[in-house]
Amino acid sequence: MYKLYFKIAIRYLLKNKLYSFINIAGLSIGIASFILIMLYVNYELSYDKFEGSENVYRVFMDAKEGDIFEPADAQTANLIGPTLKREFPEVKEQVRLYRFEKVTFKVNEKVIESTKGALADATYFNIFNYPLLKGSKETALVAPNTLVLTESFSKKIFGNEDPMDKTISAFYNGEEAILTVTGILKDMPENTHMKTNFLISMETFANWWASDEQVAPNWGHCNFFTYLNVDKNANFDLLKNKIIASDFEDDPDERYNIEPLENIHLYSDKPYEAEAGGSLSRIKFLTAIAFIILVLSWLNYVNLSTTKSLERAKEVGIRKVAGAQRIQLILQSLSESIILNFIAIVLAVLLTVFMLSVYNNITGSQLVLQTSMITQFLPIIGVLVFGVVLAGLYPALLLSGYSPSKALKGKVRTSASGLNIRKGLIILQFMATIILLIGTIVVTKQINFLQNQPIGANLNETISFQGEFLSQLSDSLVRDKYETLENEIKKLPFVTAVTRTQTYPGGGFDELNSFVGITYPNGTEESRKVYYSYATQAEYFDLLDIKFLSGNTFIDNAAGQSRTIIINESAMREMEISNPDDAIGKITNFFGIDWTIAGVVENYHHFGLKNSVLPMIIMHRNSSNNLLVKFNNKVSSNLGYTTAITDLENKWKQVFPQSTFNYTFLDKKFEAQYNEDKKFSSAFQIFTILAILIASMGLFGLTSYTCIQRKKEIGIRKVNGATIGQILKLLNQDFVKWVGLAFIIAIPISWYAMNTWLEGFAYKTTISWWIFALAGITALAIALLTVSWQSFRAAVANPVEALKDE
């Protein structure tokens, strides 16, 4: 019997090719979109998950802002880990990681730099359960000057040679250490917040470049990521509250806190994070889009199936007269639904495989689809199966419920409730489409706003370059050589300005100093507010075109440093100074030193417009972190950047022959802060287009069958003198009403959703009225274009063809 059901179902689908194509195409696109989005969502949710990861927590610092504590620092003092292990029996183990900005490795003449690595306690493998391919987890990081490499990074350095027990030179801050390879770590997955190419034993710290103050366990050196392995039976909330209540530093304005390792990527966005995290709001929005598109494809199926069921009324009547029971008719209809959806799912998987690389290229993702991921997709498979049954059940119940006498007499008509359901489905489809259109416009407008808004500094035609010294140089010699290098670079015809600086707009938190404890010029002592500072030279402000509101830049002296500072507007207001002119010459104290305010600059965006402007204090010192070079117009118009950078590298190598050379364009680095938002915008646009395509296909199919059903009515109207325009109005006016109603419903929903998304930005665009108008007009245009072609064909058809059966 079931074999017969499937045979009849296949015959019916082959006979009704347009119906089958529209349904299969719509379902395939919808399911493929759903799979693509859920691949991304699952990837984001899978961060930092390994065996035992649910028992791992990271320690972070809160600081008091006014009367409440706010997360202030992802890094902690080097003493907190051992202290928590000693004080709380729930803490089974702790590990500290000192994240490197960059380490340069040298083997023979091969020089390789890496930014992904850390000093680690010997307990690292007791916390992070990553496979060690060679070496012992118990001893690999115990002794000083020992090194663990990942498999791929080891091959990059040593090729196919066995690296175990080999030595390698490592350079950091101009200091060299000879390290011995004691382990090979399997390449870490990309979905971890602490990506690592190498680990160096914490005991190396004391023998390398660190000062005694940095090495000794203390509360002052807060540059460590600290992780805890907690007993699986421990109560997290109880442990968290006990840690919060413990004032180890005897400082009422700071406290320690903990958070689950698995939550860091999506829930943590603190200063000094190891890397930029994900976005929970982005996950929620994309998940919503995934379900909207999937539901749209099912709504198409339901709408077309119920409309098509009118054509099958006589078939149902004959089957019932012949003795078919209702359950048999339901099973027959469900068989068609299952076959159609099965074909759509197979095509959707193939479409996903085909589109995955394209999607990754557009969005910058690294998603893969593997058979090993089947367990992760069980919930998704469950959703698809449930949707298939639900989408097929309503048409089956409707079809099987027809009266055989009415069906055989051709008196089956769409009921008022059935017609209302179909209207509701169309309204729902276009409501979702309009919401996605509005979302796409708002997201695109916000990204453009972030990119085009003035940031208070001119980063164009400017590069930063630096390198690692592979020879021992004293500070005084480095300083002298840098002055020589600056003078040589200034002689180049395409260079307009040169300066040294600790950081620049677009640089990370790790390039800034942060501190609490400052005395304002009026004598007020502030111990809660976090201030950020960095060091630079006098030419820095002119080079980046940062405007002074009052005062001027530093006054150079022989030492290249002074106890004068420049503050931004935000810092000025925090210091309770209302007028920039009043700040000049005032004395403020921090680090136990009196500093004289030499100038006040306009607020500029150091971290982009996603964040508020921080109170910034800029000190005078010849930093060697970055050398900024401003090009003139000849570089882009005549000389070319490649030639200019080659000339700069040659100058660098002349002065520092035993060193590496790296550079970055400041504007590109600043724009990189918005990469994740650009990916989100691209994904939003792609899936909005697909949603529109699905809705249009459904509307096309529905219009086709509407025209067929009203074929005789159109013929009669034309015989009685109706014009083509009147026929088009007759067929299209209902769709216009439905789109209008969908637009009215979509406005408050889309406004609330996008307003919620924009709350994640400190500086945001406005949701203007024209956005809603444009989305509504676009949706209406799409609907009219979709239905008008079929309507026009029906309107110009020969009425004789429609009426000859009568």
Image (cartoon, rainbow, N blue to C red):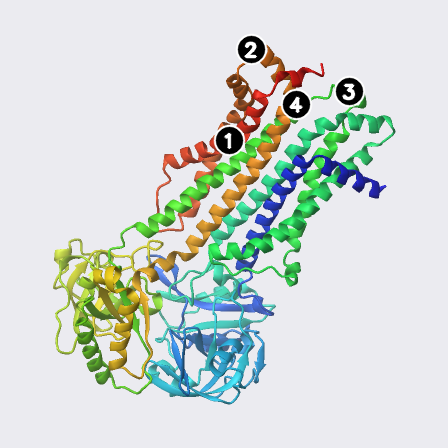
Disc assigned to residue 406 = 3
**Amino acid type at image mark 4:** Gln
Residue 755 pos. (x, y %): 41, 43
Residue 766 pos. (x, y %): 35, 42
**Quadrant holding the N terminus:** top right
Indicate the quadrant where residue 372 lies.
bottom right
Look at discs 2 and 4 and give the one toward the viewer: 2
Q: Which residue is mark 4?
A: 709
**How many other residues sit within 10 Å of disc 3, few (<14), some (14-19) or many (≥20)?**
some
- Residue at horizontal 55 percent and vertical 56 percent from the top: 356
Q: CA distance from mark 2 to mark 4?
A: 20 Å
Residue 61 pos. (x, y %): 40, 66
**How many other residues sit within 10 Å of disc 1, few (<14), some (14-19) or many (≥20)?**
some
Indicate the quadrant where residue 275 lies.
bottom left
Q: Secondary structure at mark 1?
A: helix
- The correct choice, above or below, for 443 with respect to 240 in the image is above
- Residue at horizontal 32 percent and vertical 62 percent from the top: 506
Q: CA distance from mark 3 to mark 1?
A: 36 Å
Disc assigned to residue 785 = 1
Left or right of 68, for residue 499: left
- Residue at horizontal 28 percent and vertical 69 percent from the top: 643
